[in-house]
Image (cartoon, helix red, strand yellow):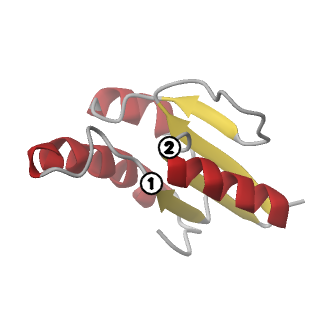
Amino acid sequence: MATKKIMVIGGLGIIGRNFIGHLEQLGGWDIMALSRRKPDCKTKAQFIAVDLSDRKDAQNKLGGIKDLTHIMYAALDGGIAGDNVAANTALLVNSVSVLEPINPKLERI
């Protein structure tokens, strides 16, 4: 049984997908991931489809997750251009601000 449980936010992007694969190879992790779409690859991770730009959707879908030890953020909306800062900030705030207060065993974000 895994002693660590992680939520990978942005689990189907380049970074998130590769990070999940790495954790699966390491073993010892329960892996959850967030994405707007279903996984298009073989994975043991439990995926949750959520629109992180929508605070209510994030609260409804993430509000019951209370056993995480780690959160890894790798989400991106529209790229890194300055025009996308507000949208990308919303993804971060709408996910971490829901998960952090209800997961007292968090070791690292």
Which quadrant is home to the N terminus? bottom right
What residue is drawn where x is 47% and y is 68%?
109
Which amino acid type is marked by label 2?
Gly
Circle 2 — which element? loop
Quick check: 74 left or right of 45?
left
Which amino acid type is marked by label 1?
Ala
Residue 107 or residue 20, whichever sits in front: 20
| Label 2 crowd (10 A; few <14 / some 14-19 / many >=20) | some
Residue 86 or residue 62, whichever sits in front: 86
What residue is drawn where x is 76% and y is 39%?
43
Q: Please say if the residues under marks 2 and 1 sit with CB atoms less than 8 Å apart.
A: yes
According to the picture, the residue beneath numbered tag 1 turns out to be 74
| Of marks 2 and 1, the one in the foreground | 2
Circle 1 — which element? loop
Quick check: 49 left or right of 87?
right
Quick check: 37 left or right of 28?
left
Q: Sequence-wise, which precedes: disc 2 or disc 1?
A: 2
- Residue 35 in percent (x, y) is at 50, 34
